[in-house]
Amino acid sequence: MAEKEVTLMKGNEAIAHAAIRCGCDGYFGYPITPQSEVLETLAAEKPWETTGMVVLQAESEVASINMVYGGAASGKKVMTSSSSPGISLMQEGISYMAGAELPALIVNVSRGGPGLGTIQPSQADYFQTVKGGGHGDYRLITLAPASVQEMADFVDLAFELAFKYRNPAMILSDGAIGQMMEKVVLPPFKPRRTEEEIAKQCPWATTGRIGMRKPNIITSLELRSEEMEQNNLRIQAKYRECEKNEVRYEEYKCEDAEYLIVAFGSAARIAKKVIAIAREEGLKVGLLRPITLWPFPTKKIGELGRKMKGILSLEINAGQMVEDVRAAVEYSVPVRWYGRLGGIIPEPEEVVNELKKMTL
Amino acid sequence: MKGATVVDVERCKGCGLCVVACPLNVLALTTKQVNQKGYNYAETVLEDTCTGCTSCAVVCPDGCITVYRKKEE
Amino acid sequence: MTKEEIIRPENLVYRKPELLNDVPMHYCPGCSHGVVHKLVSEVIAEMGMADKTIAISPVGCAVFAYKYIDVDWQEAAHGRAPALASAVKRLWPDRLVFTYQGDGDLACIGTAETIHALNRGENITIIFINNAIYGMTGGQMAPTTLIGMKTVTCPYGRDPKLHGYPLKMADIAAQLEGTCYVTRQSVQNVASILKAKKAIRKAFEYSMKGLGSNLVEIVSTCNTNWRMSPEKANKWMEENMVPFYPLGDIKDKGKEL
C-alpha cells in the first residue's frame, strides 16, 4: 500500500494497519465482537515477516493484558484490543501497569452492557475508562476517535503519550466506528526501534542487564507505606502534568452558539448532523467534542459552557460524561443528558427534540 | 585434604540444615550466642575434622557458608 | 595446618553465588526457596547469561525474588507470570526468560496461563516451587495440598469430598505437545540439590535452543506453615510428598533431538 493513498476500510482494520506502520513491536489479543478484525487483519498482514512485529492470539483477555505488561516492561511498544466484557477482564493488568508505570496501548471497541450485553455499539464504558476501572488511584490516558481516520491516527499518538508519561493509554472507540468503513489515509511507515534505541528511550526497561548495568526491576509492589505514598504522589504529579499538557478537543460552530452539545466519538458525529438540522430551524447550537476523555477538557467546557443557555451531553449510555460536564460548569448552566441504551444509536431528530425542550 | 568453613554469622538464620548435612559433625548451632537478628547461628566446633566437602554450604538456603579446601602436604 | 593457611583465595571451593546479592532474604529459616535461588543464580552465571536474562517473579513468598538475584526482573500479577514470559521471550528471542512461581500462583489462579504458555511451546522455563501450601498468606490449602494434610483452611485435613484432589501439574504439563522438558526435583540434601541444578541448567539450555517450554517442579518444604523444624520438614517431604509427587524427569524431548 503506497503512502498517502486513500483507502476504504473498517475502523478496526485501520487500527491494525496503523499499528504495523507506527513501529509497534507486539500485539496480544483475544477474539471478541465487535473488534475481532484487529487481530484478523494483523494475522492476514503477517507483520512478523516484514517489520518483525509479534502477533499472538492469547488464551484470554487476562493473558493478553499480562502479555502487554511483560512486553511493556521490557521497553517494547506493545498493544492489545478488545471490547467491553474483555476490557473488564483486563482491569487487573491495567491497574498493575499504571502502578508499575508502563506504557502500552489498549483499544476498547466498546459494546452495550452490562454483562454480556449486546454486540451493538455503546459508550457505556466511559466511567470504567476515565474513573479507574481497576483498583487504586490511577488514570488512563484516553483518546476517543470519531472516525476511521482518527482510529488510524490515534494509534501513534496513544503510544507517544503512553511513553511520554510511562502510563497505559486507551483508545475508547465503539462498535460503530470499529465496524464502519470510511476512507482513510494511513500514517507513514516508521521503523521499529532498535535495541539501542529502546535502551536509550527506556533506561528503566527489563531488557536484560545490557553492559552489566544495575538490574532493572518492574513492580507495582511496595510494602512500606511511606514509600508507597511517595510512589503514589509521583504518579499523581505525572497526572497533573498530563492534565496541563495533553487536553485535546474539537470545537464546532461554537462562535455564535447559544446551546452547546458535548459529545465524543460516534455521538459527536450524530451531534454534527443535529447541529445542521437545528441551525436550519434557527437554533444556534455548537459542539465541543472531547478528544481526550482523560485528561478531560474541563477548563474549556467551563469557559465555553458558561456562555451558553444550556448544555446537552449527548452520550450513547445512561448519562456518564454528563457528570463531568456539570462539574466543568460548576452547575452554573443547565446541563441535560440525552442518550440511547442497549446498542441503539440515537437518531438526529430525537436529539433535536431534546434540544428544543431546553429552549422552553 | 583439609578444609575450613566461614559462616556469615549475620546472614545465618539458624535453620540447622548445615549441621544435619555435615557428615563429620563439624558444625553446630550456638546455644547461647545469637546474631543481631536474634538467631542462634552455625559455628565450627570440630575445626580439625573439616574436609572441605562443601555439603554444609550447598544445603544452606541463605548462602551463608564459604568453604575452603587445601591438599595436605 | 592452621585454619588461616586454608582460608586463602586459591583454596576457595564454595561461596554464595555472585548473582545472589547481599540483601538478606525474607524467607523463613530453612526455606527451600533460598536453595533454589542459589541454583538459579549459579546456572545463569555459568551459562554467561547474566546480562541477557529477564526473569518474572510471582505473587506469593517468592514475590521479592527480584530483590535477591541480580538480573532484570518483572513482578507479575498473581498467576500471570507465564503470560508475561511468553510476550517477553517472543519480543526478545535471544534472552533467557524464566518464571519462578509457587503452587498457588502456578497451579491455582494461574493454571490457564501456565498450561497455555507451556502448550504454545514458548521457549521459556517455569521454575515451580511446590510446597503444598500457601506460604505468604499464612498456610492456607493449596491446589497441591495432600489428602489428609492439615492447613488453616482445611484444619481437619484435606478431604476430597470437601476440597477435591491435589493437582499434579508436572504430569499434566508432560502431556502437552508444547513442552520439551518436564521434571520433578527436590532440594533437601546435597545429592538432590546437585540433580536439581542440572535440571535447571538443562531447562534453560533447551529454552535457549528454542526446543519448547520447560517445567522444573521442585518439591519443597514450608516448615513454618507445616509447623515443623526445617530438618523434620525435609523428612516429612521425603516421606509424604515424594510418594505422591515422584521425583525424576517425566519428559525430555531434548534428549531425543
Image (spheres, coloured by chain):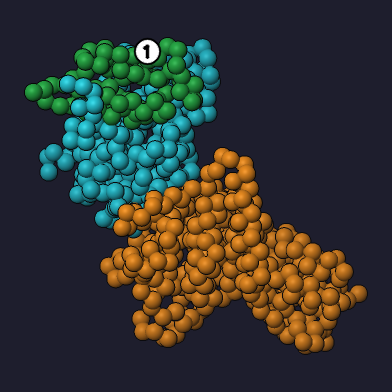
Chain colours: A orange, B green, C cyan
Mark 1 neighbour class, 10 Å CA radius: few under 14, some 14 to 19, many 20 or more: some
Task: Please provide percent x and percent y for residue C9.
Answer: 22, 36
Amino acid of disc 1: Lys
Which residue is label 1 attached to?
A: C232
* Above or below A5: residue A243: above
Outermost residue toward the right? A360
Direction from residue B7 to residue A292 in the image, left or right: right
Quadrant of the rendered image containing residue A312: bottom right
Which residue occupies 66% across, 76% down? A249
Direction from residue A270 to residue A256 in the image, left or right: right
Task: Let me know if residue A281 appears in the view.
Answer: no
Direction from residue C67 to residue C253 in the image, left or right: left
* Above or below C88: residue C220: above
Task: Please provide percent x and percent y for residue A150.
Answer: 54, 75
Q: Nearer the viewer, residue A267 or C224?
A: C224
* Number of callouts: 1
Q: Quadrant of the N terminus of chain C?
A: top left
Which residue occupies 84% across, 79% down? A307
Task: Let me know if residue B55 appears in the view.
Answer: yes
Task: Please provide percent x and percent y for residue C208.
Answer: 23, 49
* Above or below C142: residue B23: above
